[in-house]
Amino acid sequence: MRLHLNENTAGCSPAVIDALRQLGRPEAGFYPDYDDARQAVAGLFNVPADYILLTNGLDEGILAACGAAFRDRSGGVPETLGVAPAFDMYETCTTALGGRMVTVPLGHDFAHQTDRLRAAITPATRIVFLANPHNPSGVRVPLDMLKQLVRAIAPIPLFVDEAYADFSGDTLIDRAAFDVSPSLLVGRTFSKAYGIAGLRVGAVLGNPIALEPLRRVVPPYSLNAWATIALPIAIADGSYRDWYVGQAEASRALLTTACTRLGLTTWPSGANFVLVRVGPAIARIVAALAAKGIRVRDRSAEPGCEHCIRITAGLVEDTQRVIPALEEAVCDARQ
């Protein structure tokens, strides 16, 4: 079981597969048209189409945001700013483009402290990256806090990564908010709740003025034809998405209850995963789960995540298989 990358463990909607099976030589031979995909995203988020930039997965959106921000190289090496721990692609994209990432530690229980972020801004700061819900903890960041931050740091862009917002229900996506705060960028992915991670579809949303520099970075036809055809169908099958979000919610509750029974620390998660502090025997526990074909993510090397693993909360039937394996691994490690 792949419970280490927070994928949709059920896969995509059956309607997506049915559509992809109909594709053939013309779709492979011609450059894709993005209109239907862009309109589907616009309808989903209730914003005009020009407030959307489609990207090859959200990773490309993060890379494009860095590339656009780094056009201004006055004052030396450009910097991005974020928190630690965080999704590693913020730093990966920063360093790939010749920048340097500066991070500030999170507070107790992964609480975000925006005063620390504001204090860390320097003349070299080009963009700030935050995720809501936070990754790897799953902790929600209050929307009002993010709204205040984007106003406080303007005109420096605030890129809010909402990769797991389908599970939390929290979002900053709003046309009026983008118009009031044009330095706000919001990233979304269709890999998680919609189950098309293998097709690589993401989006960055914001005011058209804010998106224009990113459009100059993203190559034409970044999405392939299969992705552009699958996206509107995945979005249209809202019942499938809602079913999987429900599965993730139930799995989070099952995992949290089991960990509490085992005396393991967890944090309230708004995502499709749970961070669990399993203790000093983490290597033995991860290995024991792997021996049973269960892959989880060891996050223990990151600040605040000492002795922690992250477990994807997906299909309930998978979670029901994971819990006894985790119980056995933890109990064996304590002997």
Image (cartoon, rainbow, N blue to C red):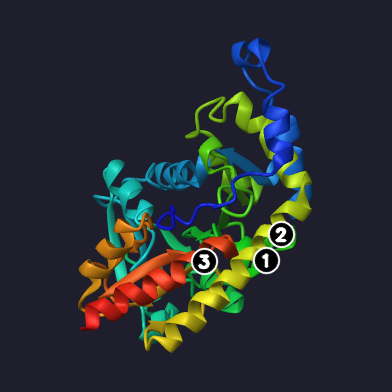
SS at circle 2: helix
Q: Which residue is mark 2?
A: 243
Q: For the N terminus, give its image quadrant.
A: bottom left
Task: Using the image as rendered, state which of residue 153 and residue 291 is in the foreground.
Answer: 291
The label nearer to you, 1 versus 3, is 3
* Residue 128 visible in the shown view: yes
Comes first in the chain, label 1 or label 3: 1
The residue lying at 71 percent from left, 40 percent from top is: 14
Q: Is residue 184 above or below residue 65?
A: below
Q: Which residue is mark 1?
A: 246
Give percent across and percent down for residue 177: 68, 63
Q: Which mark is residue 65?
A: none
Asked whether, in this view, residue 74 is left or right of residue 243, the answer is left
Cα separation between marks 1 and 2:
5 Å
The residue lying at 47 percent from left, 81 percent from top is: 258
Q: Which corner quadrant of the image does residue 325 belong to?
A: bottom left
The residue lying at 65 percent from left, 31 percent from top is: 228
Cα separation between marks 1 and 3:
13 Å
Q: For the C terminus, give its image quadrant.
A: bottom left
Asked whether, in this view, residue 214 is left or right of residue 278, the answer is right
